[in-house]
């Protein structure tokens, strides 16, 4: 690759071949849309959203190379060529022995936990993502988060996604036989999209080895994590993202993956692992609910998109642009002092609604209120990660989430710098009028994962 690094401008490393018009709406229309949606942005129709930052999951743009291979998708039921290309890519990057395709990440979690987690078991993670937590609890296990202490700091720290090693040692020592697996989520989505260092994974591996407990990665954003390691971890600057990714996977016994993130696909995922006993159980479960082990609920062309996408996610030019576009937005917001988690995450920026709206108590959901205000102002859809998403306890009571955040997650290869400039302008306006924002009242709170379907109204 010819790479001229003497220029400072980081450009989008693609040109645009197919375009899709953005859809503009009026403020009045957005108000109606919200009312009809029970003030839940998950229920707003896509046609009413101008810039959609609800998630980076399955929302990316495919490359010409992916489309090309998708035309060669082999739809053979058992033993399709597409599966073997998919399997080869996953094995090449992860080095793990067995690859089970699934339709997305949570299917991999469900199948894995069905095989490994029993009632009363304790699953430890730096921070469980909401589906991961729900899948542990579905098995009547306890999902325990032990993020590193720096995660809660105001100060910048290069690896706020790390798992707390002291607590890991303590919990494993105090609960012999009760922990079927430890997971590390890279990057730590619920903790601000923050990376985990190689050193941290290595140390966790050593602790798990001493206690003979398997270690897994929740690998959704493994490529972004590898890029942060390349940028920030001592001695890693001369290594490529793929070399770093391979080392991350070499330190674990298995991984769950949503290919809707760093698989650069619109759907897909996998479970990859070494333990043959667990593999056999997982494959049997897969056949019951997902499909035959060589397609796992995916079409042949989906498998092709992932096989190509996993490598594209690891390209340096792409990662440089990807991480920079979020940092660029953070820089614009920092100029006026908008509170957010710093340093910015890999796939998303996390606004700190708790700090921005101190006049709204946690049980009136400041994050939710801010997300609604951003949508009303500029048609931008983000996602609350606060007491609506995490406040609900398994026993039905409510408790304040650790933080009241709004996540603005960027789809891959979809938006350009001018889109980001527009997002900054809208956020600056909302921030200027922050005193006017009101809290929300919960009208209907479903028993699990309530943020997807809850209905609320402004107070
Ligand atoms: N683990 C992490 C860390 C995730 O961020 C997600 C999904 C999953 C597992 C589940 O994967 O959606 O393919 O079933 N996160 C999306 C998000 C939904 O918006 O952050 P999935």
Image: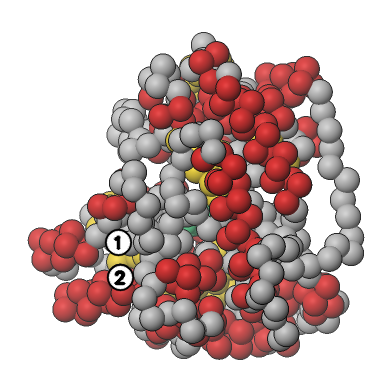
- Residue at horizontal 64 percent and vertical 26 percent from the top: 429
Q: Is residue 82 left or right of residue 26?
A: left
Expressed as whole percent of the image width and height from the top left, the position of residue 58 reads: 67, 57
- Point out residue 321 in the picture as x, y percentages from the top left corner: 65, 63
SS for callout 2: helix
Q: CA distance from mark 2 to mark 1?
A: 7 Å
Q: Give me the residue at 30% from left, 66% from top.
A: 182
The reply to whether the C-beta atoms of the residues labelled 2 and 1 are less than 8 Å apart is yes
Q: Nearer the viewer, residue 78 or 351?
A: 351
Picture quarter containing residue 198?
bottom left
State the mark number for residue 17. Answer: none
Q: Quadrant of the N terminus?
A: bottom right
Q: Report the residue at 63% width, 72% height from top.
A: 313
Classify 113 as above or below 349.
below
* Residue 303 can be seen in this image: no
Please determine whether, in this image, residue 131 is positioned above or below residue 450. Answer: below
Packing grade of label 2 (10 A; few <14, some 14-19, many >=20) is some
The numbered mark at residue 200 is 2
Looking at the image, the residue that sits furthest to the left is: 174
Q: Residues within 10 Å of mark 1 (few under 14, many from 20)?
A: many
Left or right relative to 386: residue 118: left
**On the image, numbered disc 1 is attached to which residue?**
163
In this view, the residue farthest toward the front is: 6
Q: Nearer the viewer, residue 124 or 374?
A: 374
Quarter of image, res 455? top right
Total numbered circles: 2
> Residue 27, percent across and down?
76, 21
């Amino acid at each position: 690759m010819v790479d001229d690094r003497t220029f400072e401008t980081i450009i989008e490393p693609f040109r645009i071949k197919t375009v899709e018009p953005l859809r503009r709406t009026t403020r009045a229309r957005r108000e109606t849309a919200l009312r009809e949606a029970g003030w839940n942005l998950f229920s707003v129709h896509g046609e009413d959203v101008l810039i959609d930052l609800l998630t980076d999951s399955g929302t990316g743009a495919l490359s010409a190379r992916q489309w090309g291979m998708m035309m060669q998708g082999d739809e053979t039921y058992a033993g399709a060529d597409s599966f073997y290309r998919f399997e080869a890519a996953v094995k090449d990057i992860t080095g793990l022995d067995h690859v089970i395709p699934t339709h997305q990440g949570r299917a991999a979690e469900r199948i894995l936990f069905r095989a490994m987690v029993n009632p009363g078991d304790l699953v430890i993670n730096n921070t469980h993502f909401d589906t991961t937590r729900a899948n542990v609890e579905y098995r009547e296990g306890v999902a325990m988060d032990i993020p590193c202490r720096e995660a809660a700091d105001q100060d910048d720290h290069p690896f706020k996604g790390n798992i707390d090693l002291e607590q890991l040692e303590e919990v494993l020592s105090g609960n012999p036989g009760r922990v079927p697996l430890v997971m590390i989520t890279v990057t730590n989505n619920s903790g601000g999209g923050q990376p985990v260092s190689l050193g941290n994974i290595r140390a966790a591996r050593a602790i798990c080895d001493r206690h003979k407990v398997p270690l897994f990665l929740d690998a959704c954003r493994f490529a972004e994590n590898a890029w942060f390691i390349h940028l920030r971890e001592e001695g890693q600057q001369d290594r490529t993202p793929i070399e770093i990714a391979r080392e991350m996977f070499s330190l674990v016994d298995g991984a769950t993956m949503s290919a809707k993130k760093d698989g650069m696909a619109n759907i897909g995922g996998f479970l990859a692992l070494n333990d043959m006993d667990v593999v056999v159980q997982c494959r049997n479960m897969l056949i019951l609910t997902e499909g035959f082990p060589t397609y796992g609920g995916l079409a042949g062309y989906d498998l092709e998109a992932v096989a190509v996408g996993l490598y594209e996610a690891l390209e340096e030019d792409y990662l440089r642009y990807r991480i920079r576009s979020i940092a660029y937005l953070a820089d614009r917001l920092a100029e006026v002092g908008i509170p957010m988690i710093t340093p910015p995450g890999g796939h998303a920026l996390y606004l700190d609604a708790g700090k921005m709206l101190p006049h709204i108590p946690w049980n009136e959901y400041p994050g939710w209120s801010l997300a609604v205000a951003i949508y009303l102002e500029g048609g931008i859809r983000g996602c609350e990660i606060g007491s609506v998403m995490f406040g609900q306890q398994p026993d039905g009571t409510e408790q304040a989430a650790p933080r009241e955040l709004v996540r603005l997650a960027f789809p891959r290869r979809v938006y350009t710098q001018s889109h980001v400039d527009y997002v900054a302008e809208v956020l600056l306006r909302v921030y200027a009028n922050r005193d006017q924002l009101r809290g929300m009242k919960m009208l209907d709170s479903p028993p699990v994962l309530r943020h997807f379907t809850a209905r609320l109204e402004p107070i």
